[in-house]
Image: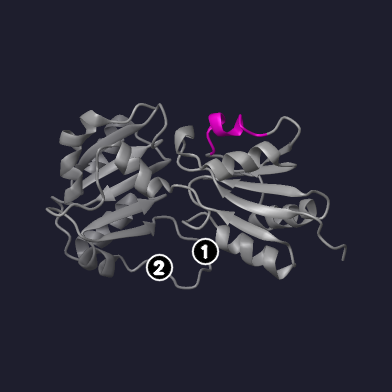
């Protein structure tokens, strides 16, 4: 096999607001030879890519996959053999529900130089822009980040929602809108009261950010009435009660 001449950078683009993108990530986009980017990367960040760089969309949205995960890995390996700076631009943080660990494993296995550049994950940023602190001395001293959309054939059959309900004061769910009825049922069965507050934050940190605030008992009806859709982060716990007070200080996007 031809020896690689370049390096792959797994770069976290953050949640959407270009002001939250890292300086290191911006510098890499300006000097990249190839950028392979996800669907949820904001247009403002894509605009930072060098005009001389080859740009390849590889985003995955529910029911619409531009490239399979195996194809993305093969593409990264191929481009690293012919280009000096290859950027894999991923929404949020590469290592937080971003499959960055899987891609890095494969690249290392094939002897490809690789470096991860962290980004701000939406599970932290979206609630912050909605005026919801994930921890607060009066409300919550623990946070659990969990995916609401598990892959088939994974290392274990299901998230232990019972343990999460009993062990964490704040629950942050990624990609959980479509499975929310099931998740709420599991949390209720584990003893979480239906009066527990929940916030859904759609397009977090972007200009079109929206929030839907309710309880585990009311939120599904609210979704049906408003047509609220993914992509969104769900925050469950008493910290959601701070939204009405703190959202007035929403950052300027």
Quarter of the picture holding the C terminus: top left
At 24% from the left and 46% from the top, the residue drawn is 133
| Mark 1 crowd level (few <14, some 14–19, many ≥20, 10 Å Cα) | few
Does residue 38 appear left or right of residue 53 in this picture? left
Outermost residue on the right side: it is: 2
The label number, if any, that marks residue 152 in the structure image = 1
For the point 35% across and 26% down, the residue is 252
Q: Secondary structure at mark 1?
A: loop
User: Which one is nearer the viewer's eye here, 55 or 249?
Assistant: 249
Residue 242, image quadrant: top left
Can the viewer see residue 130?
yes
Q: Is residue 60 above or below residue 137?
A: above
Residue drawn where x is 61% and y is 29% of the image? 47
Q: In this figure, which colouring scheme has been used for the structure?
A: one colour
Residue 99 pos. (x, y %): 55, 58
**Could you say where residue 207 lies in the image, as x and y percent from the top left?**
41, 26
**Image quarter for residue 36?**
top right
Residue 42 belongs to magenta span: yes
Mark 2 or mark 1, earlier in chain: 1
Looking at the rendering, in which quadrant would you find the N terminus?
bottom right
Magenta residue span = 41-49
Q: Which residue is mark 2?
A: 158
In this picture, is 79 found above or below 168?
A: above
Residue 28 in the image, given as x and y percentages of width and height: 64, 43
Instruction: Residue at 64% x, 55% y: name it.
Output: 69
Q: Is residue 50 above or below residue 128?
A: above
Res 177 visible: no
Find residue 82 and name its label: none
Compute the Cα span from label 2 to label 1. 10 Å
Most extreme residue toward the bottom is 156
Q: Hey, which quadrant is residue 209 in on the image?
A: top left
Q: Nearer the viewer, residue 177 or 207?
A: 207
């Amino acid at each position: 096999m031809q020896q690689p001449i370049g390096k792959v950078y797994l770069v976290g683009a953050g949640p959407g607001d270009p002001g939250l993108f890292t300086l290191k990530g911006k510098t890499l986009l300006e000097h990249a030879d190839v950028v392979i980017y996800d669907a949820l990367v904001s247009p403002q960040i894509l605009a930072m890519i060098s005009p001389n760089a080859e740009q390849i969309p590889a985003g995955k949205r529910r029911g619409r996959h531009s490239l399979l995960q195996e194809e993305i890995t093969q593409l990264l390996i191929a481009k690293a053999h012919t280009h000096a700076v290859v950027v894999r631009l991923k929404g949020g943080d590469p290592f937080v529900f971003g499959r960055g660990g899987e891609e890095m494993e494969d690249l290392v296995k094939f002897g490809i130089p690789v470096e991860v550049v962290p980004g701000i994950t939406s599970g932290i940023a979206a609630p912050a822009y909605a005026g919801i602190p994930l921890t607060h001395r009066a409300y919550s001293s623990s946070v659990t980040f969990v995916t609401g959309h598990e892959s088939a054939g994974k290392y274990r059959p299901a998230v232990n929602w019972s343990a999460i309900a009993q062990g964490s004061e704040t629950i942050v769910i990624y990609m959980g809108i479509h499975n929310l009825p099931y998740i709420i049922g599991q949390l209720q069965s584990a003893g979480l009261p239906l009066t527990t507050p929940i916030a859904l934050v759609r397009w977090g940190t972007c200009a079109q950010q929206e929030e839907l605030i309710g309880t585990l008992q009311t939120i599904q009806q609210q979704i049906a009435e408003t047509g609220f859709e993914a992509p969104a982060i769900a925050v469950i716990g008493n910290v959601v009660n701070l939204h009405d007070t703190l959202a007035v200080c929403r950052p300027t996007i």
